Image (cartoon, grey):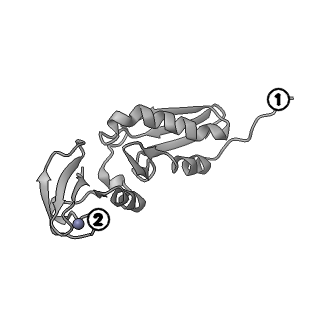
Amino acid sequence: MVMTAPLPTAAAVRLLLRDVVDPEIPTVSIVDLGLVHDVRVGADGIAVELLPTFVACPALEVIRSAVIDALTALGSPVEVSFTFAVPWTTDRLTNAGHAGLRNAGIAPPADPVDVRCPFCDSATVAMDSMFGPALCRSLFYCRACRQPFEAFKPI
Ligand SMILES: [Zn+2]
């Protein structure tokens, strides 16, 4: 008699995905970044569809292996694919995602006039450069605590 492990639930898969982080922003999980488009569990295994964002672009292969690593514990084959079914936008970031960005010293996406300092929450900030170290971020300077910081650009 062949023993087969019970199929994991999609909820169990999503729970484990909460531990997978963006390698560039380790305080935000791919779930809170809004990268997880679909999770399907069937007899063939687990299929996870992710939305590629230019935010995570250089890290896509890293994220793919991190997802596979996180889900191997469930004992089913894992297939990770990237889909363009819907466009990723900064609206997909969850509240926890916004909090995680602030913890990383990055202002969550907002109109440039509404950007607040992630360190002291001051609104007295000035944009230093449209082009931060990553395409998706701009550089700001806080006049209150005199710290430079990055802000996520809304897209
Ligand atoms: Zn500040």
Mark 2 lies within 8 Å of ligand 1 (Cβ measured): yes
Q: Which sits in the foreground, 87 or 99?
A: 99
Q: Are marks 1 and 2 in contact (CB under 8 Å)?
A: no
Q: Is residue 59 above or below residue 105?
A: above
Q: Amino acid at mark 1?
A: Val
Mark 1 or 2, closer to the camera: 2
The residue sitting at 69% across, 41% down in the picture is 7
Mark identifier at residue 119: 2
Q: Amino acid at mark 2?
A: Phe
Mark identifier at residue 2: 1
Give the quadrant of the N terminus.
top right
Q: Residue furthest top?
A: 1
Image location (x, y in percent) of residue 146: 18, 64
Q: Is residue 59 above or below residue 36?
A: above
Ligand 1 location (quadrant): bottom left
Separation of residues labelled 1 and 2 (CA atoms): 57 Å
Image location (x, y in percent) of residue 87: 32, 43
Mark identifier at residue 15: none
The residue sitting at 55% across, 35% down in the picture is 68
Q: Secondary structure at mark 1?
A: loop
Q: Which sits in the foreground, 43 or 34?
A: 34
Image location (x, y in percent) of residue 2: 82, 29
The residue sitting at 18% across, 52% down in the picture is 139
Please identify the quarter of the rendering in which residue 98 is found. bottom left
In the image, taking residue 8 as reference, residue 110 lies left or right, namely left
Q: Earlier in the sequence, mark 1 or mark 2?
A: 1
In the image, taking residue 122 as reference, residue 126 lies left or right, namely left
Please identify the quarter of the rendering in which residue 142 is found. bottom left
